[in-house]
Amino acid sequence: MLCAVHRLRRVLQNEATDVTLDIAALELASIEFPGIDFEPSLFRLDHFAEQISSRLPSSAPPLDFIRAANELLFEILQFRGNESDYYDPRNSCLNAVLSRRLGIPISLSLVYLEIARRLNRPMSGVSLPGHFIVVYEDNDSRYWIDPFHHGRILTLDDCRELVHQTTGMDLRQYPSALLPATPRQIVLRMLGNLKSIYLKGQALDKARQVLDLLVLSNPGDAEEYRLRGLIHLQQLNHRAAKADLETFLRLAPASAERAQVEQQLLQIERWKAALN
């Protein structure tokens, strides 16, 4: 698995990486789809960009590009948010999103971003609390777009209302949330989504692979070690569980979970003693 996601690892370890989001996202999808062939997905993205390019001059103003992208993606191709099965892991996998034309805010935004990149359009992801959108921003204009809701163009007030409806938070208290997200931040958010989905569904091997990447990206995050240690414990990988749980205690000695983790470590020691 580590070999299969070497470019994804570069994104997680270096903000300045030249790895594109489509490649990183497809490597991430290999957790759900081992042995995935990238070419059909890359071909689809290339083809979508060519369809827009064939009907729109490169000098067309931003709103014309946005309207053309919205028409192609949401009217002709019928991409849409999977509201009926939001937590299906396929919604977070670029290959499946492209083939099924179903996704969640961040994966649909990724499709939009990768088409824009192919056409040299200045678009970025925006990692709002509870929702993910994209922004088209050049020297003269700025448009926020919500791919999950058919490419709706948002005002600043719309963004604030969207965040309030989704999380109850006041976006005015978090102005940095409107800044363009880096590729690393986007991939980390995708990993966080998959972590929650896999843990909830008890897909332990896949959850552990996601946690391996999260630990790699932020080796000082104690909670990721604890979660991975619990998975190792469930899978009877006692040595690995012990290492992760001890790392958790070292990184978060005052955690409310300390007593529980110490009890789990004691259980591991008792298991080892029973083998002797």
Image (spheres, rainbow, N blue to C red):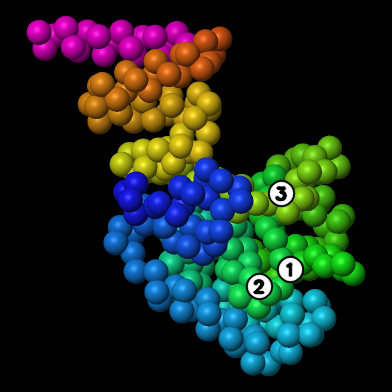
Q: Which mark is residue 122?
A: 1
Q: Nearer the viewer, residue 39 or 80?
A: 39
Residue lying at 43% horizontally and 66% vertically, measured from the top left:
96
Q: Find numbered disc 1 in the image and state the secondary structure of the residue it sits on.
A: loop
User: Is residue 272 rendered magenta in the image?
Assistant: yes
Compared with 268, 113 (above or below) is: below
Badge 3 amino acid: Leu
In contact (CB < 8 Å): disc 2 and disc 1: yes
Give the side of residue 20 with respect to residue 123, left or right: left
> Disc 2 designates what residue?
116
Q: Nearer the viewer, mark 3 or mark 2?
A: 2
In the rendered image, residue 270, in percent from the top left (x then y), is placed at: 22, 8
Compared with 192, 227 (above or below) is: above
Badge 1 amino acid: Pro
In contact (CB < 8 Å): disc 3 and disc 2: no
Return the residue found at the far bottom.
55
In the rendered image, residue 81, in percent from the top left (x then y), is placed at: 58, 64
Sequence-first disc among 3 and 2: 2
Residue lying at 52% horizontally and 10% vertically, measured from the top left:
253
Give the side of residue 268 with respect to residue 142, left or right: left
Q: Tell me if mark 1 has few (under 14), some (14-19) or many (20+) residues whose alpha carbon lies within 10 angstroms of its own.
A: some
Q: Which residues are magenta?
A: 258-276
Q: Nearer the viewer, residue 59 or 236?
A: 59
Sequence-first disc among 2 and 1: 2
